[in-house]
Image: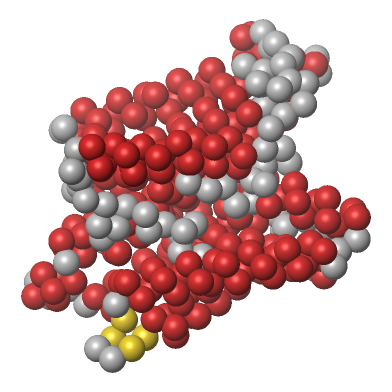
Amino acid sequence: MNGRIILPCLAIAAVVTMLIGPFIGGVPVAFDALLRPGAPDAGAVLLWKLRMPRILTAFFAGAALSVAGAAFQAMFRNPLATPFTLGVSGAASLGAALYMRWGADTGTAGPGGILASFAGAAACVAAVYGLAWGRGGVSNARLLLAGVAISFCCSSLIMFSHYASTATDAFRMMRHLMGSLSSSGWETVAILLPVTLLGGLLLWALAWELDLLAVGEGIAQSRGVPVERIRHAIFLVTCALEAFVVALCGPIGFVGLMIPHCCRLWFGGGHRTLLPASLLLGGIFLSTCDTVARTVVAPSEMPVGVLTSLIGGVFFLWLLFGASSTNTSLE
């Protein structure tokens, strides 16, 4: 499908989602509240101080996760390879959990929490590389297996941190690790917007290299691509994207797996179109999921990570049985 048609349509859909989503919820809001951002009435306050920053946070978080997943899938030539499945998200969550348990602040949205999440993600990448290094360099198979092993180790350490915490810290840690946007504000939008756009642009600048890596490392090297250097750059950008999302919103799984995979099926594998399409569709998807999560059990709300994991489980079954029925390889 032509990118000149795809991307404008997705951009329009994103704008519509962000305009309609804030008006949906357990408490109705009149549409004229959109024109009264500074009004003191309850509708305008609910719209502009709570729902609007929340849906924008959801959009940029989903966009960051999706574009990072698209880069990982191309680099490993595997539709199941994402920062979430390779342990990067788990390690960033461990950094955030340790900061909540022993950090000076009460939350992870500040510089300390973001730095702790990034340190965890970077340590995961270093460990994965160290474990995967063997005769002949680093292979994708060893990287995938090492990432899964690191993810299990991080999950165990998170559980230990949770067990060793006070009741208050344990509750905050559990709510954060479920993946929730309930504490979103304009400050989280101000952080995620430039991070997501910058990360997306950096990965988009490597679209040609990603196209070649998706074909094979040998082909990429024969065309003059410095594979190791490009791999390091992709890891650095995706670690930063994942760390910011985890610190601000918690670990939200399966977005980076499902959205790039669907975009590749619908729009083709060329990363000049695939990356921006994944960015836009990922934002639309997570914004919609968060709207459903805070509406379906109103006046309470469901953590959005619970809903995305539920959808991700169904998606895995579709990959398993749908791919089998159509004789499509997942490798």
- At 38% from the left and 73% from the top, the residue drawn is 143
User: Residue 309's image quarter?
Assistant: top right
- Camera-side residue of 47 and 127: 127
Q: What quarter of the picture does the C terminus occupy? A: bottom left
Q: Is 225 in front, or is 160?
A: 160
Determine the image quadrant of residue 50.
top right
- The colour scheme applied to this rendered structure is secondary structure
Instruction: State the image coordinates of residue 322 (x, y, percent, origin top left).
Output: 29, 37
The number of numbered discs placed on residues in the rendered structure image is: 0
Residue 117 shows in the view: no
* Residue occupying image coordinates x 66% and y 21%: 295
Residue lying at 77% horizontally and 26% vertically, measured from the top left: 300
Identified at 67% across, 47% down, the residue is 178
Where residue 270 sits: x, y (%)? 19, 48
Q: What percent of the width, then of the height, locates residue 175?
A: 75, 47
Answer with left or right where residue 214 lies relative to residue 152: left
How far across and down, in percent of the image, does residue 147 sit? 46, 70
Q: Is residue 312 above or below residue 30?
A: below
Apparent side of residue 279 relative to residue 288 in the rendered image (left or right): left
- Residue 21 visible here: yes
**48 relative to 14 in the view: left or right:** right
**Image quadrant occupied by the N terminus:** top left
- Res. 4 image quadrant: top left
| Residue placed furthest toward the right | 167
